[in-house]
């Protein structure tokens, strides 16, 4: 059975990795502010979602990771729909996500109704990467 819970401090080892961009102190803030979710399947942790507020008023999903064995089973769709509903219930009017142009996430989000909103070039070390594209979705149309 699939379920989503808010992350707790006990999830730190699952969410924060030495090579990742989320520090322990930032994870603690995400837990406090309820901006980090753990995805479970049959009581096993299988993924994570993290968001911030862009411009202080637009929820921006900064991380969604689902373990490989659980991908392409509709779990990502359910997780994003859950987040969208939570953001709408909190009164937000739109939401944003991003993905690198060389990742398949752009197709996933477009299929869920997200529209391309632009991109940025991150060519400064240590954050060099392919083009990062931003996608957005209105919550007023739902």
Image (spheres, grey):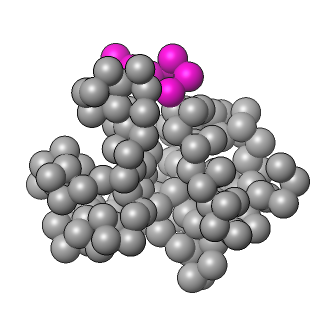
The residue at the point 16 percent across, 67 percent down is 24
Image position of 58 (left or right of 61): right
Q: Is residue 128 above or below residue 56?
A: above
Image coordinates for residue 124, horizontal then vertical, percent: 36, 70
Q: Residue at x 23, y 69 (%)?
A: 28
Furthest residue toward bottom:
56
Residue 123 is inside the magenta segment: no
Nearest the eye: 9 or 57:
9
Residue drawn where x is 59% and y is 32% of the image:
77
Residue 129 placement (x, y as % from top left): 40, 54
User: Which quadrant does the N terminus fall into?
Assistant: top left
Residue 133 visible in the snapshot: no
Q: Which of the 4 image quarters holds residue 98? A: bottom right
Can residue 78 be spotted in the picture?
A: yes
Residue 19 x/y as whole percent: 17, 53
* Left or right, 92 with reference to 103: right
Count the numbered circles shown.
0
Q: x, y (%) of residue 111? A: 73, 33
| Range shown magenta | 68-75
Q: Nearer the viewer, residue 35 or 103?
A: 35
Q: Is residue 61 above or below residue 126?
A: above
- Left or right position of 87 against 50: right
Left or right of residue 137: residue 12? left
Q: Residue at x 83, y 49 (%)?
A: 142
Q: Is residue 74 magenta?
A: yes
In the rendered image of this protein, does residue 75 appear above or below residue 57? Answer: above
Query: In which image quadrant can residue 113 be found?
Result: top right
């Amino acid at each position: 059975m699939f379920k989503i819970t808010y992350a707790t401090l006990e999830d730190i080892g699952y969410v924060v990795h030495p090579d990742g961009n989320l520090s322990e102190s930032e994870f603690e803030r995400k837990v406090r502010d309820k901006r980090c979710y753990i995805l479970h399947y049959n009581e096993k942790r299988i993924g994570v979602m993290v968001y911030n507020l862009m411009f202080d008023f637009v929820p921006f999903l900064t991380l969604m990771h689902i373990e490989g064995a659980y991908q392409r089973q509709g779990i990502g769709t359910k997780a994003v729909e859950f987040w969208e509903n939570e953001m709408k219930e909190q009164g937000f009017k739109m939401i944003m996500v991003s993905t690198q142009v060389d990742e398949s996430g752009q197709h996933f989000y477009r299929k869920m109704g997200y529209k391309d909103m632009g991109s940025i070039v991150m060519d400064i070390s240590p954050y060099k990467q392919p083009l990062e594209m931003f996608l957005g979705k209105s919550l007023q149309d739902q």
